[in-house]
Image (cartoon, rainbow, N blue to C red):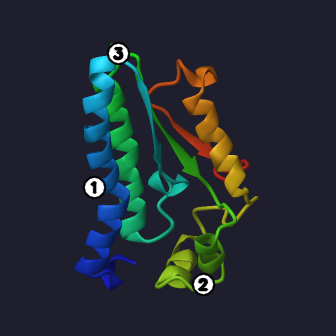
Amino acid sequence: MIDETDDEWLEHVYQTNVFGPFRFIREALKVFLPKNEGCIINISSVNGDRPFCGASYTSSKGAINTLTKNVAMRLINTNIRINAVAPGATVTPAHLANKAGEQPGGAKMLEFSKHFVYFPGPECDPMDQANACLFLASDMGKHVKGQVIQVCNGAFL
């Protein structure tokens, strides 16, 4: 919760979820722009639009969604694609800890947000997220640009 988040944690989350991808995109474009081809896939979360988890996490995923669309606008006249995959509840150690109320502040935030979201809803397997990335990286996704594709088994319609 925002009132329990210190600057150190906020900076850690943003370094991982926003600043890392921002820097990666910038470096990738040094290779992709001269070739006029490439594909970038960011990993977001349904929390980028439905902020029921911690303030630092959800705001960082919202930033990734906006960054993805902004870069897609920049690249619209190129053969370089950028999209994001936004997982819903996916059976991972972090998800299981959050579901069990073991994430710092997680149980409290879930209590506040339970009226606004269907959580955990139908869960996904990590391979479901990987398959979405494979689609976007393949020729099947060659005309998908600037999209944030939710893979959530219908839990966050």
Label at residue 19: 1
Label 1 environment density (alpha carbons within 10 Å; few <14, some 14–19, many ≥20) = some
| Residue 129, above or below 108 | above
- Can you tell which of label 2 and label 3 is closer to the viewer? 3
Dots 1, 3 in contact, CB < 8 A: no
Q: The residue tagged with tag 2: helix, strand or loop?
A: loop
Residue at the far right in the pictured view: 122
Residue 119 appears at what percent x and percent y? Answer: 66, 66
Quadrant the N terminus occupies: bottom left
Amino acid beneath label 3: Thr
Q: Residue at x 39, y 51 (%)?
A: 62
Residue 105 appears at what percent x and percent y? Answer: 47, 84
Residue 112 appears at what percent x and percent y? Answer: 52, 76
Q: Nearer the viewer, residue 72 or 154?
A: 72
Q: Which residue is mark 2?
A: 101
**Which tag, 1 or 3, sits closer to the chain's start?**
1
Amino acid beneath label 2: Gly
- Can you tell which of label 2 and label 1 is closer to the viewer? 1
Q: The residue tagged with tag 1: helix, strand or loop?
A: helix
Amino acid beneath label 1: Phe
Q: Which residue is mark 3?
A: 78
